[in-house]
Image (spheres, rainbow, N blue to C red):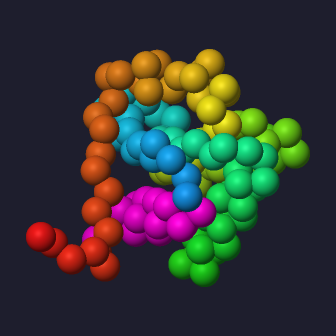
Amino acid sequence: MTDTEKLLQTAFKALDEKKAYDIKVIDISKVSILADYFMIATGSNINQIHAMTDLVEEKLSKEGYHPRAVEGYRLGNWILMDYQDVVIHIFDQESREFYDLERIWTDGEIVEIKDPDQKED
């Protein structure tokens, strides 16, 4: 597993643990120099969005990953966490619908994140 895959998996599990919904990962490496991946998730209120952000940062920090920047935390409607190759966007529902990153980045490829702890059927 690459460092980027480990980062994606750790962040995905943290978001899932805090009940984020509609978590999507888009591979933008072939269409942008901004990052290799965007991870997008939605929370239902500012408290949940802050909890999601805090847990992602805590779990990734324990794995040795530290963000270059975290923006939007105070307002909490769209928090951007920049981990160089991976940019994590945590939205409230209204902002996610308004900015619609999935539509903007349709040239990217949706990536399925698999939990290694989950048993296969």
In the rendered image, which quarter is residue 30 located in? top left
In the rendered image, which quarter is residue 37 located in? top left
Bounds of the magenta segment: 1-18
- Residue 42 visible in the current orientation: yes
Provide residue 22's location: percent of width, then percent of height: 46, 42
Provide residue 26's location: percent of width, then percent of height: 38, 39
In the shown orientation, is residue 73 left or right of residue 11? right
Q: Looking at the image, is 55 positioned above or below residue 37?
A: below
- Residue, x 32% and y 57% (percent of image)? 113
In the shown orientation, is residue 78 left or right of residue 121? right
- Residue, x 71% and y 54% (percent of image)? 48
The answer to if 47 sits in the magenta stretch is: no
Q: Looking at the image, is 60 positioned above or below residue 96?
A: below
- Residue, x 53% and y 22% (percent of image)? 100
Could you tell me what secondary structure mostly forms the magenta stretch? helix
In the shown orientation, is residue 78 left or right of residue 27? right
